[in-house]
Structures are given as structure tokens and as C-alpha cells.
Image: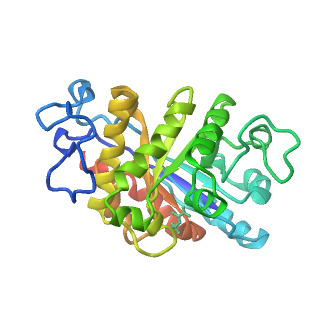
């Protein structure tokens, strides 16, 4: 199963834009108009104590799980104490969605891990957005690194999938992220921007999209991005949204981090201004640990 969780996030500081102390992954400031003397407009009308974005925690379990292990996980999640201001989503494998939907508390929403690119029909082996809606899925994860790099889905195909899911009222967890060699070649931002552009070109609106930044080198490896590495990319993504979509979308869109998040490293990551929650794989298979991660995403609220 996979889960998403997000928590409340305070307003961003203007100095997080194009911060010079960051590691130089960005070759250029994405917009020359954006600099430290220019406060993003949303800062001017937002109270510093009022959270802009609800945080979200999501569990995505890939192909893991059996009827028996999922029954135990559901029972652990049903009895876990989860902060009320965190949106929690689980993304079980398709074949277990019905089981999860019928026995999991309504407080947790259900996501699929993939969907077909257009209206359902004669596409053997695929699952349509209409079917996902029929069994109660509110979300779908698209553009996961395994879809991109194992199955071979490209940016445009993923963008089209996102556009179709949104057109049917299903929210999209839009994954982006660079390979290790792309990071080492200084291409992290370029890769993420291209992936974002493909979504932007295809979606009717950003109202129902959560962006999941998942560096491929961190997924399932036990090598988590440092809080500074993750924050650096999250700021760049928000900056890209501001420059290419709108300041409002940039301030409202939740950007969650995924890649070897666990009960021990979540709190420090969650304190970063632009990390609005997590997409969790391996650690979401253990209910109590996932609950710890869910509750960690409120740490900025406490700090506010
Ligand atoms: C994932 O599968 O998207 C993921 C983030 O996995 P993990 O948490 O195990 O790295």
C-alpha cells in the first residue's frame, strides 16, 4: 500500500528563493525577476501564523502486501492516533482497494497507484479512472519513478493521464524527481522543470494536484535526501509554479517529499518550510511507524 500525508505549512520566507548558500543544483535562477529583494506576493497578505496549506501524508505500498498483511495494517491504522489537521491517503495495489475501502476508517482517503490515460474501453490490463471512481478512489498517483523508468512512460503521456484524471474529478499525486546521474550532472532542476511543464501543459487546473518530489536515488534505497536537499528542490518547484502558472497556485499547491522517509527522519524533514507532507513507501507498511510520520507533518504548526 502507499500512503500520502501532508501537514500544515507556514508561509515561505522570501530568502528561500534563489538562496545562494544552496548547493548549486540550479544553473540559473529560474526567473531573473525573482530575487531576494522581491517578496512573493502571497507573503504580503498572509498572516505568518495562518497555515496556507493543509499537510498531507500518503502511503504507497507498491506491489507489497497480501490479504492477511493488509488486514493487519488496516487494523493498525484504524486504531492509530492521527492528528486531525493532516490529510491521510493510502494507495494500496488495485486488487486490494475494495478490501481497504470497506474496512478502513473514512478518515483516511484512498488512492490508486496508476490510471489509464483516457476514457476506459478496450485496453486490456489497464484500469480506468471511471473504475477507480466507482470503487471510491479520490486520488491517483501518476508519474512515479517506477512508471517512468521501469515501464517507460514519458512526460507527455504522464501529463495526459493527469489531465484526464482531473477532468473526471480524481485528484492527482503528480510525482517528479531526478535520477542519481542527473543530480550528479547538475540537472536536477532541469529534469524537474521538464516534468512539471508536461503536467502544466495538460492539466485544466492545479486545484486538485499534490506534487510529490521523489528523487529516484532516494526511493527504496534507505538514502534519504537531507532536509536541505529536499527543501532546495521544493523551493525551486514552488518558484517554477510561481513563474509559470501563478503566485496563487505556487502558494496553495502542496509539495510533499518521498524517498526513504521513516519514523526517525520525518520530523527534521517536516520542519522545512516548503515540505507539506510525505509520500511513504516501505515505512508505510508498518502502521505505528506510518502514524508517527503522519503526526510529524504538523511540526511546522507547532513552530508557528
Ligand atoms: C515510493 O515507493 O514512492 C517510496 C517513496 O518508497 P520508500 O519510502 O520506501 O523510499
Q: Residue furthest left?
A: 37
Q: State left or right for residue 31 relative to residue 92.
A: left
Quarter of the figure with the C terminus: top left
| For residue 177, above or below residue 84 | below
In the depicted view, which residue is nearer to us: 221 or 25? Answer: 25
Quadrant of the image containing the N terminus: bottom right
Quarter where residue 48 is shown: top left
Does residue 270 appear to the left or right of 6 in the view shown?
left
Judge by depth and name the residue closer to the eye, 290 or 21.
21
State the scheme by which the image is colored.
Answer: rainbow
- Residue 239 visible: yes
**Total numbered labels:** 0
Q: Residue at x 48, y 75 (%)?
A: 221
For residue 85, say whether it is visible: no
Residue at horizontal 38 percent and vertical 72 percent from the top: 264
* Image coords of residue 206 (percent x, y): 50, 31
Query: Which residue occupies the foreground of this view, 43 or 98?
Result: 43
Image coords of residue 161 (percent x, y): 65, 40
Residue farthest to the front, as pictured: 185
Residue drawn at point x = 71 percent, y = 67 percent: 70
Residue at screen point 60% across, 69% down: 285
Amino acid at each position: 500500500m502507499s500512503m500520502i500525508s501532508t501537514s500544515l505549512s507556514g508561509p515561505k520566507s522570501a530568502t528561500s528563493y534563489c538562496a545562494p548558500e544552496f548547493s548549486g543544483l540550479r544553473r540559473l535562477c529560474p526567473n531573473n525577476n525573482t530575487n531576494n529583494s522581491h517578496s512573493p506576493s502571497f507573503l504580503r497578505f498572509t498572516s505568518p501564523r495562518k497555515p496556507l496549506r493543509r499537510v498531507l501524508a500518503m502511503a504507497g505500498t507498491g506491489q507489497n502486501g497480501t490479504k492477511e498483511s493488509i488486514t493487519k495494517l488496516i487494523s493498525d491504522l484504524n486504531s492509530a492516533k492521527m492528528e486531525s489537521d493532516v490529510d491521510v491517503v493510502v494507495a494500496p495495489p488495485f486488487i486490494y482497494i475494495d478490501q481497504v475501502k470497506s474496512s478502513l476508517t473514512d478518515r483516511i482517503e484512498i488512492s490508486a497507484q496508476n490510471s489509464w490515460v483516457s476514457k476506459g474501453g478496450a485496453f486490456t490490463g489497464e484500469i480506468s479512472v471511471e473504475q477507480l471512481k466507482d470503487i471510491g478512489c479520490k486520488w491517483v498517483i501518476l508519474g512515479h519513478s517506477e512508471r517512468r523508468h521501469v515501464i517507460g512512460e514519458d512526460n507527455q503521456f504522464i501529463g495526459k493521464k493527469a489531465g484526464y484524471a482531473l477532468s473526471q474529478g480524481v485528484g492527482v499525486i503528480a510525482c517528479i524527481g531526478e535520477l542519481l546521474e542527473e543530480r550528479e550532472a547538475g540537472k536536477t532542476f532541469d529534469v524537474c522543470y521538464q516534468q512539471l511543464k508536461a503536467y502544466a501543459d495538460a492539466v485544466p487546473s492545479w486545484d486538485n494536484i499534490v506534487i510529490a518530489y521523489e528523487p529516484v536515488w532516494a526511493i527504496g534505497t534507505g538514502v534519504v535526501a537531507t532536509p536541505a536537499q529536499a527543501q532546495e528542490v521544493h523551493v525551486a518547484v514552488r518558484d517554477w509554479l510561481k513563474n509559470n502558472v501563478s503566485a496563487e497556485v505556487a502558494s496553495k499547491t502542496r509539495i510533499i517529499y518521498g524517498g526513504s522517509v521513516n519514523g526517525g527522519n520525518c520530523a527534521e524533514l517536516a520542519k522545512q518550510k516548503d515540505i507539506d507532507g510525505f509520500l511513504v513507501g516501505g515505512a508505510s507498511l508498518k502502521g505505528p511507524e506510518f502514524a508517527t510520520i503522519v503526526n510529524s507533518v504538523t511540526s511546522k504548526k507547532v513552530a508557528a
